[in-house]
Image (cartoon, grey):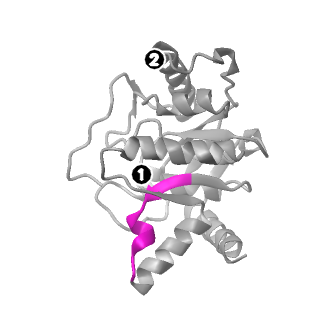
Amino acid sequence: MLYRALRVVLSFLARIYLRPVVEGADRVPAKGPVILAINHLAVIDSFVVPMMLSRKVAFLAKAEYFEARTLRGRFVGTLFRALGAVPVQRDNSRAALAALDVAGEALDRGEAFAIHPEGTRSLDGKLHRGRTGVAQLALEHRALVVPVALVGTDKVQPAGTRLPRPHRITVRFGTPLDFTRYDGMGSSLPIRRAVTDEIMYAIMELSGQEYVDSYHKRPNAAA
């Protein structure tokens, strides 16, 4: 009950602060496993999308946010859980596999799960090549994929800033993509690549970003 109340309050504040234009939210299935594949321009992106939907959306967050022992740290952890954040260790050799395992468990429970196929946020504003983990999840867990484009979040929280700034954003939800035609072929790397590229193309059409067919590499100092 506490988490639900916090979620309502945070969503209300976000709509006032960000003045979002939300397009196509009704395209997100009300039930069943679904992956929200989102472009990534700012740290706040993972939090923005869940607040724009009535359906609860799970997403990954660093475990450190949930392990803090200070009063402030515990408060932040509570807020993250209210928004659907799932803690995951991201600083070890099994980080990527652990993240996929957590996502897969959520999808098997029939939940919605948000993921950034680029793997890290774009510092040049362009849409970069997607990593095939999103395809692996869609194929192994028979989940629909809804492409999502965020526009303006890089103005809310430019690289190097900690606190968000008031700025209007746009959140566009695309038509769900069904990849059941590839049933039984999830172990094929070319199939995973083709599925990922189809998802990225859909995001590109929604966002209007220039596409770069290479993985984004960010400086170590970037957040």
Asked if residue 88 is positioned above or below residue 166 in the image, the reply reads: above
Q: Residue at x 49, y 64 (%)?
A: 166
Q: In this rendering, which labeled residue sits more in front, label 2 or label 1?
A: 2
Instruction: Name the spot of residue 168 as percent of width and height, x first.
Output: 54, 56
Q: Quadrant of the C terminus?
A: bottom left
Instruction: Name the spot of residue 122 as percent of width and height, x first.
Output: 36, 41
61 drawn magenta: yes
Q: Quadrant of residue 107?
A: top right
Rounded to the nearest angstrom, the CA distance separating label 2 from label 1 is 29 Å
Q: Which badge, 2 or 1, is on the more N-terminal residue?
A: 1
| Disc 1 element | loop
Span shown in magenta: 59-69
147 drawn magenta: no
Amino acid on which the number 1 mark rests in the picture: Ala
Q: Residue at x 26, y 42 (%)?
A: 218
> Horizontally, is 142 left or right of 218 in the view?
right
Which of these two is toward me, 110 or 148? 110
Instruction: Name the spot of residue 87 as percent of width and height, x first.
Output: 48, 60
Q: Quick one: label 1, few (<14), some, or many (20+) residues within 10 Å?
A: many
Q: Quadrant of residue 164?
A: bottom left
Residue carrying label 2: 189
Q: Quadrant of the N terminus?
A: bottom right
| Disc 2 element | helix
> Horizontally, is 189 left or right of 4 in the view?
left
Residue 42 has which mark? Answer: 1
Which of these two is toward me, 169 or 179? 179
Q: Residue at x 39, y 76 (%)?
A: 68
